[in-house]
Amino acid sequence: MSKVFRASLILAVFFAADKALGLIRQVLIARQFGLTYNIDVFNAANNIPDLLSALISGGALGVAFIPVLSEYMEKKGHAQAWELFARIVNFAFLVTGALAVVVVIFADPIVRYVIAPGFPEPQKLLAIQLMRLDLIAIVIFSISGLVMAGLQANQHFLLPAMAPLFYNLGQIFGIMLLAPAVGGRTFGPLTLPTFGFGIHGLVYGVIIGAFLHLLIQVPGLIMFKFKWKPVIGLNDPGVRQVLALLGPRVLTMLFIQSYFVARDNLASRMGEGSVSALNYGWFIMQVPETLIGTAIAIVLLPTLSEFVARGDMESFKNTLNKGIRVLVALTIPVTVIVAVGLPQVVQVLGFDAAGTARVVLATRAYLLGLLGHSLLEIASRSFYARQDARTPLLAAAVMLVLFMICAIGYSSLWGFVGIALANVTAFTFEALLLLYLLNRKIPGVVNVWDSIPRVLAAALVGGVVVFGLQHWLPLPEMRRLIESVVGAATMGVAALVMLPLIWREVKLLIKL
């Protein structure tokens, strides 16, 4: 197995575990709060803190940081690379703290006029409280997200892959013990107290999870002999190089994260449960997108950055082409399999028939963009590996404008589902635009046409198999949890059946 495949496999395994815990978390939230305004408020209140996290820590700064840190390690050694790392971490922490204070001061108008203008007054007040609390976690993430980037630049992926698991465990602790009414919850022979914090308990769990997210990665810093220094030095050449990439990347992430703000702004006007239905749909689509697109793209970024630093553009092209082929071969069949088998699996959330139908509709709409989102992961990172942050910025600006136009038009026709379809249109267009521009710079990098017939055949076979297993097998009436497990199992069987049709692309991944 190649180094890239091994690292991708490690990430995929831990991302799968993370998504499994995330699913447990979502099921617990659904059963505790239902598809109600309380959980709508929780989801909407996270938007601005999530925006800060994406801009300052693992999102914007992390992706802008890895190519420069990889170059330092390649040309100047680990000592200077870690000194640059310390400067960037200190800078990010101070900037995040300052922005968090600003958001705390202006939380009221942000919620009323930007995040959720359609919420009733009590829900607006609750959203303000939850947003302010959530900023504590974001300050922690300003360090933790960069630690992930630093370890990944060292080609160490294990602890960064484990960190989201601990973040989910913190949130599950909040749901299980902090949110329920005062009393006790029994786990076999053990009874633990519950604290009755309600929806606030979810945010306390987020804060605990953020601390655990950082703590689990500290041994990695020790292993690679990182020593913290109280320095920033904005005139340092390495810091200036990172900031030169960071400016466009921040704006790019601002455009991308603005989608979530705009989505919830529109959905808040469409009745109780609309925000949450879109959040659940997005979460379910993100499971295969993370396991396939994000895992491969994260691992490829340091490798592509090393090829650029060495001037080996032929290896850059070949590696990137293989990565694109793998994404196309995996995401199209998975889209069909999940879309067909979804209704049985969503039963685990415990909603009534109407709530389940809304989540299924939102998820199927988002799944149409699985390929586009996965390609966007690798396409944008390809430009950052070349230390070109302006092209992804322009593409993200086009995406946001296109989303706003489509969201307003689609939602007037199809309600909250139109918002998900607008996401598919805008993000897929952004991915295709970046790949077109990349192919102009490096001809042949996006040549995948000979894979398409096998991919479509695999998608057809997978869809037929999962449909047949779920509808033609004589299964008795079952509890929702068992029914969901059986539904997921049928998807797994369908994936195995269609795998031989795309085995050529799977071998590319193994040798990537």
Image (cartoon, grey):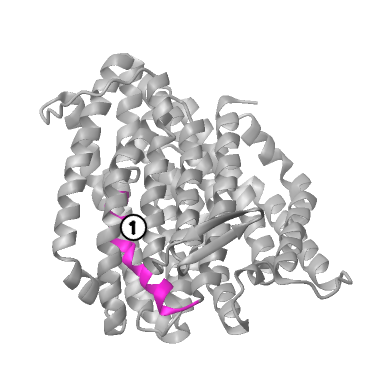
Residue 49 painted magenta: yes
Residue 334 or 443: which is nearer the viewer? 334
Estimate the x, y position of residue 60 in percent, counting from the top left: 30, 45
Q: From the image, which quarter does the C terminus lie in?
A: top right
Residues in magenta, as a range: 35-54
Helix, strand or loop for the magenta stretch, by majority: helix
Residue drawn at point x = 78 percent, y = 65 percent: 464
Residue 414 against residue 49 in the figure, above or below: below
* Number of residues whose C-alpha sits closer than 10 Å to that of mark 1, classed few (under 14), some (14–19) or many (20 or more): some
Residue 162 painted magenta: no
Residue 190 or 39: which is nearer the viewer? 190
Q: Where does label 1 land, which residue?
A: 256
Is residue 10 rendered to the left or right of residue 270?
A: right
Location of residue 388 by image quarter:
top left
Location of residue 38 by image quarter:
bottom left
Q: In what element is the residue under mark 1?
A: helix
Residue 77 against residue 289 in the figure, above or below: above
Residue drawn at point x = 29 percent, y = 71 percent: 127
- Specify whether residue 407 is in view: yes
Is residue 217 rendered to the left or right of residue 367?
A: left
- Specify whether residue 366 is in view: no
Residue 337 or 34: which is nearer the viewer? 34
Estimate the x, y position of residue 262 in percent, counting from the top left: 32, 70
Residue drawn at point x = 36 percent, y = 23 percent: 309
Q: From the image, which quarter does the N terminus lie in?
A: top right
Badge count: 1
Residue 44 or 331: which is nearer the viewer? 44
Estimate the x, y position of residue 128 in percent, counting from the top left: 25, 69
